[in-house]
Image (tube, rainbow, N blue to C red):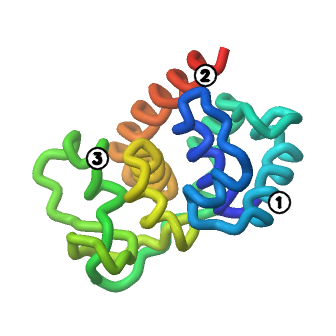
């Protein structure tokens, strides 16, 4: 698995029943078509998508995100810069944490917030998140799961992510 595999799976979840082509996924995520194609093949091997590479295996993805992502793709923090809010500084987590003074951002030239840098799963994540609000929220939740410790934030992320994945699974049946 590579980090972009998760970004692609999360984007597929935001499709709402429409199956984007490999080219469509690539354009929406600012990735190459070959990267998306290779990623979907890895996801098929890992049983995170069906054999046609169209439907996300929600239970397997949920299990990996909740129990494995913090070990495979841990949250990496950097210096304070301007960027796009993430982790506990963005919806849907920030509204549920009263009085949080910490700010975390993905490096992004058009960003409007200042905070400690969080290395995104893939370099084009901020750009893709700006084009798709639902994907943005999923990526924020995943960032909260990438942190070792911080049980309150993780609990919120698990609850929110589980609800979103359940809706996806119900719409795909």
- State the CA–CA distance, disc 1 to disc 3: 31 Å
| Left or right: where 13 falls relative to 158 | right
Measured from the top left, where is residue 14 in percent x and y? Answer: 52, 38
| Badge 3 or badge 2: first in the primary sequence | 3
- For the point 30% across and 63% down, the residue is 85
Is 30 rendered above or below residue 16?
Answer: below
Q: Residues within 10 Å of mark 2 (few under 14, many from 20)?
A: some
Residue 72 horizontal side relative to residue 159, left or right: right
Instruction: Identify residue for label 3.
Output: 91
Quadrant of the frame with the C terminus: top right
Give the alpha-carbon distance from disc 1 to disc 2, as whole Å.
24 Å
Mark 3, secondary structure of its residue: loop
Residue 119 % position (x, y): 48, 73
Mark 1 or mark 2: whose residue is earlier in sequence: 1
Q: Quadrant of residue 62?
A: top right
Location of the N terminus (image quadrant): bottom right
Residue bearing mark 1: 38
Between 167 and 154, which is closer to the camera in this rendering? 167
Image point (30%, 75%), residue name = 110
Q: Quadrant of residue 29?
A: bottom right
Residue 169: assigned label: 2
- Whether residue 39 is visible here, answered yes or no, is yes
Q: Is residue 172 left or right of residue 86?
A: right
| Relative to 71, 38 lies left or right | right
């Amino acid at each position: 698995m590579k980090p972009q595999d998760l970004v692609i799976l999360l984007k597929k979840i935001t499709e709402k029943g429409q199956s984007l082509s490999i080219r469509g996924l690539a354009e929406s995520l600012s990735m190459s078509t070959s990267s998306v194609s290779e990623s979907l093949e890895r996801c098929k091997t890992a049983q995170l998508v069906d054999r046609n590479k169209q439907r996300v295996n929600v239970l397997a993805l949920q299990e990996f995100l909740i129990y494995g992502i913090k070990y495979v793709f841990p949250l990496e923090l950097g210096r304070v810069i301007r960027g796009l809010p993430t982790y506990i500084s963005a919806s849907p987590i920030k509204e549920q944490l009263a009085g949080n003074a910490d700010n975390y951002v993905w490096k992004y030239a058009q960003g409007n917030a200042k905070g400690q840098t969080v290395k995104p799963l893939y370099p084009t994540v901020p750009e893709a998140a700006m084009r798709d609000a639902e994907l943005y929220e999923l990526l924020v939740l995943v960032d909260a799961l990438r942190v070792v410790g911080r049980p309150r934030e993780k609990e919120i992320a698990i609850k929110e992510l589980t609800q979103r994945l359940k809706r996806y699974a119900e719409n795909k049946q």
